[in-house]
Amino acid sequence: RKKGSSSPNKKTLWSEFYEYASPTNENVTGKSIRNHIRTLIEAEQHQQCCYCRRPLLTNAYAKPIEHILPHSIFVQHTFNILNLSISCVDCNSKKSDDVWTAHRERFWRTTRYPTARAFSDMYHPRLHRYDEHIKFFRVQSNTHCISIYTGLTPQGIKLCEKLLTHISKLEVFISANSELKKYIQTLQDEQSQPGSAAGDAI
């Protein structure tokens, strides 16, 4: 549909996959496969968000699978393992379907996944080493948490500008408001569940 210039369905391949059920094995579902993918990648990332490096929460819904090149745009990479990472809800929500590279058109036209070198103007959590691009410092007390991020390369600087500066401010604001924190967690739990009526309404 995209190649033919007709409008694509609102429903994505990723959301359709979530509803998949094997006709021969009731234990094989889209949901179970996605949970397995999440578990594997999360272990690779040492239970940290691929962007902000904060610890991922124990609730599976608070650990969305992140499509580095958004699957709503780069349909051909929806199931490519190189395009999948695990982020926290904050980073996933802020990034959404943003494309942080000037090579968008070139990436969109090819079915082959771009190499690490091709991501010259954006940080790629699967293909780049975090420590080479970002330096961060985190202080936590009983009531506050402050994270300071510094970009070391053009890719790291862009990640700070597009995402990490926002996450740092949000973290300070929420950690200082314990009552607000409780309500935001409720919203995030609902919003992160694919296809839920409450999530769509929020």
Image: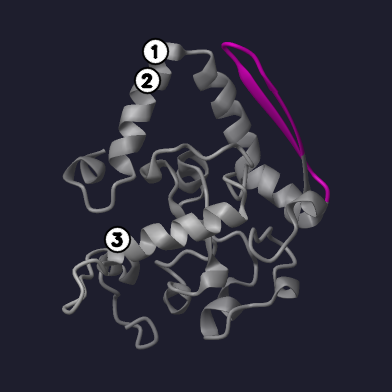
User: Mark 3 or 1, which is nearer the eye?
Assistant: 3
Look at mark 3 in the image and give the residue it sits on.
Answer: 31
Q: Residues within 10 Å of mark 2 (few under 14, many from 20)?
A: few
Q: Which residue is mark 2?
A: 182
Q: Position of residue 114 (x, y in %)?
A: 64, 77
Compared with 134, 177 (above or below) is above
Which is nearer the N-term, disc 3 or disc 1?
3
Q: Nearer the viewer, residue 3 or 19?
A: 19
Question: Given the image, on which type of amino acid does mark 1 rest?
Answer: Glu
Whether pointer 1 and pointer 2 mark residues with C-beta atoms closer than 8 Å, the reply is yes
Answer above or below: position of 26 versus 174.
below
For the N terminus, the image quarter is bottom left
Q: CA distance from mark 3 to mark 1?
A: 32 Å
To which quarter of the image does residue 189 belong?
top left
Q: Which residues are magenta?
A: 136-152
Q: In 3D space, how far apart are the residues under numbered discs 2 and 3 (Cα atoms)?
A: 27 Å
Magenta stretch holds residue 24: no
Residue 174 lies, in percent from the top left, at: 50, 21
Q: Quadrant of the C terminus?
A: top left
